[in-house]
Image (tube, helix red, strand yellow):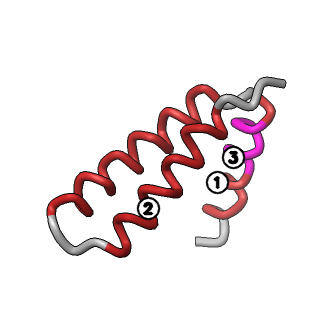
Amino acid sequence: MPLFFLITLGTGLATTYLFKKSHDEIGYIAGIMTGIGFIISLIIAPWQIQVLMLLLVLFSSKKF
């Protein structure tokens, strides 16, 4: 199973740290890039991980 999606996930986590530490425009740009990175990592993730994420969302939404 290729783990290429971890590259975008790691980049997203690094920009999240930058977003939390910065209070100017670069923080907002980093926040946008984090969102895009997480979406891309979910798209290129293997189907097993996508199904796991789907099950987590389905079971957590029943509590609400």
Characterize the local packing of mark 1: few (<14), some (14-19) or many (20 or more) Cα atoms within 10 angstroms.
few
> In the drawing, does residue 10 fall left or right of residue 40?
right
Task: Name, please, the residue furthest toward the left.
Answer: 25
Q: Residue at x 71, y 54 (%)?
A: 56
Mark 1 touches mark 3? (CB < 8 Å): yes
43 w.r.t. 25: above or below: above
Amino acid type of the residue that numbered disc 2 sits on in the rendered structure: Thr
Q: Is residue 13 above or below residue 10?
A: below
When the figure is inspected, residue 19 is found, relative to residue 39, above or below; the finding is below
Judged by depth in the image, the label closer to the viewer, 2 or 3, is 2
**Mark 2 secondary-structure assignment:** helix
Residue under numbered circle 3: 53
- Which label sits in the foreground, 1 or 3? 3
Report x, y in % for residue 27.
Answer: 26, 63
Camera-nearest residue between 11 and 49: 11
- The residue wearing badge 2 is 16
Find the magenta span and give its range.
Answer: 49-55
Q: Amino acid at mark 3?
A: Met
Please say if the residues under marks 2 and 3 sit with CB atoms less than 8 Å apart.
Answer: no
Q: Main secondary structure of the magenta part?
A: helix
Please tell me whether mark 3 sits on a helix, a strand or a loop.
helix
At label 2, counting other C-alpha atoms closer than 10 Å, the crowd grade (few under 14, some 14-19, many 20 or more) is: some
User: Foreground: 24 or 64?
Assistant: 24
Marked residue nearer the N-terminal end (2 or 1)? 2
Q: In this figure, which residue is indicated by the disc labeled 1?
A: 57
Query: Quick one: quadrant of the C terminus?
Result: bottom right
Give the alpha-carbon distance from disc 2 to disc 1, as whole Å.
22 Å
